[in-house]
Amino acid sequence: MIKFLHCADLHLDSPLASLDLKRAEIRRSEFRSTLAAMIRSAQTNKIDFLIISGDLFESEFASRETIALLCHEFASIPECNIIIAPGNHDPYTSQSYYRRTEFPENVYIFDSTELSCFDFPEKNTTIYGYAFTDNTLDFCPFEGFTPENPDRINILAAHGEFGSRNTHKCPIPTEVLANSGFDYVALGHYHNYSEIKQLKSTYYAYSGCLEGRGFDECGEKGAIIAVADKSEGRFQLGAKFVRFSKRHYEIEQLDITGAETNADLLNRLAALIKERGYGEDTALRVVLTGNTAGELKISQKFLTEQFPQLFLLEFKDETLPLLDSDTLKRDPTIRGAFYNSLAGMLDGNEDERELAALALRYGLSALSGEDIIDF
């Protein structure tokens, strides 16, 4: 029996360009802290293999300090074998830290696009893998391959796009994985946890990233901890997802139809945040929807200031103005002309309606001499 921890896409030293400088620095520090927490978990749970399926760090931005931290953390668990399959953000190149750094003896790094393996006979386990050697990989390195010793626990560390044949980020066709003969395929590249799935005799999963970096990576993030055994050719797996992320990104929709003031909006927003239990570990984007009266001027700055307990709060305004369209159509002034110039878009597709509604709100407020800076 073995225990392994499968993670991927840590993206240490990511620039985090969507955040302001202060929050970006906080998050970069938290990424390192999360790595350390994962290492401590591996130690506590007596993990035999820590499998990192690509994008451990961002090669373009990685610092010597971060690489030194990796070496220190890896060396702190000498009884754990650490297997790294470099991905498209941390490819194994002649100038990469993978080649220029002397990692601890318990670290094993794949260095070629050609499938190879590290064998651990004392654990009855063979771990296969490959490396991106550039930021693209146009073929599947294990297509047509089956493990040499089916009596071993055979694990594959694979960074790529499962279910695809047409990609420059390592295509992994469904049928190739299904016929591979591996007992478990530890996938990396997609940043959401996929659940543990099975095709024929092969289990596989994306662990997702260890920390979310933006609103395209919502929810709690972490890794997979598993117990595996194989006897008489029968593979058994018990696995679970474990959260390691310090913070999580979330997107919520809030219908503000009927709200007449920012105070009304504030009450609805406070109720939503309380109901969901969002706190200091939450980066929240609220999508405002519904129909709003023309006199309601949403102050995003005011609303954001009321929830300092959240790590981040931002808004996306998708409301539509509740206007007397018949009156505006007949208005002989520039207001009517402005409305009529947008009428076609207001009846168009969703994107056109949203754009026209925003333009109408800006325009009519400006024509009335009102402040539009905080829209």
Image (cartoon, rainbow, N blue to C red):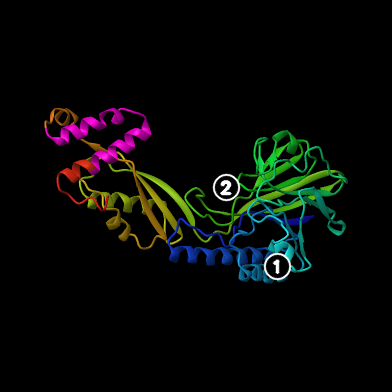
Question: Looking at the rendering, in which quadrant would you find the N terminus?
Answer: bottom right
Residue 28: percent from left, percent from top: 53, 64
Where residue 98 sits in the image (x, y, percent)?
Answer: 71, 62
In depth, the one of 307 and 330 nearer the eye is 330
User: Residue visible at 68% across and 35% down?
Assistant: 165
Residue 349 included in the magenta stretch of the image: yes
Majority secondary structure of the magenta segment?
A: helix
Q: Position of residue 8 (x, y in %)?
A: 64, 54
Residues under labels 1 and 2: Cα distance?
25 Å
Q: Earlier in the sequence, mark 1 or mark 2?
A: 1
Q: Quadrant of residue 270?
A: bottom left
Residue at position x 57%, y 67% from top?
33
Give the residue at x 78% y 36%: 179
Q: Looking at the picture, how far across and down is residue 166, in whole percent?
A: 65, 35
Amino acid marked by disc 1: Phe
Q: Quadrant for residue 256, please give it.
A: top left
Q: Badge 1 is on which residue?
A: 74
Q: Is residue 138 magenta?
A: no
Comparing 167 with 56, the one in front is 167
| Residue designated by label 2 | 192
Residue 93 image label: none
Decide: is 20 above or below 257: below
| Image quadrant where residue 168 sits | top right
Query: Can residue 258 be seen from the camera position used here?
Result: no
Query: Pointer 1: residues within 10 angstroms few (<14), some, or many (20+)?
Result: many
Give the SS element for disc 1: helix
Could you tell me if the residues under marks 1 and 2 are in contact, i.e. CB atoms within 8 Å?
no
Q: Is residue 63 visible?
A: yes
- On screen, residue 255 versus residue 84, left or right, reads left
Q: Amino acid at mark 2?
A: Asn
Query: Magenta stretch?
Result: 333-362
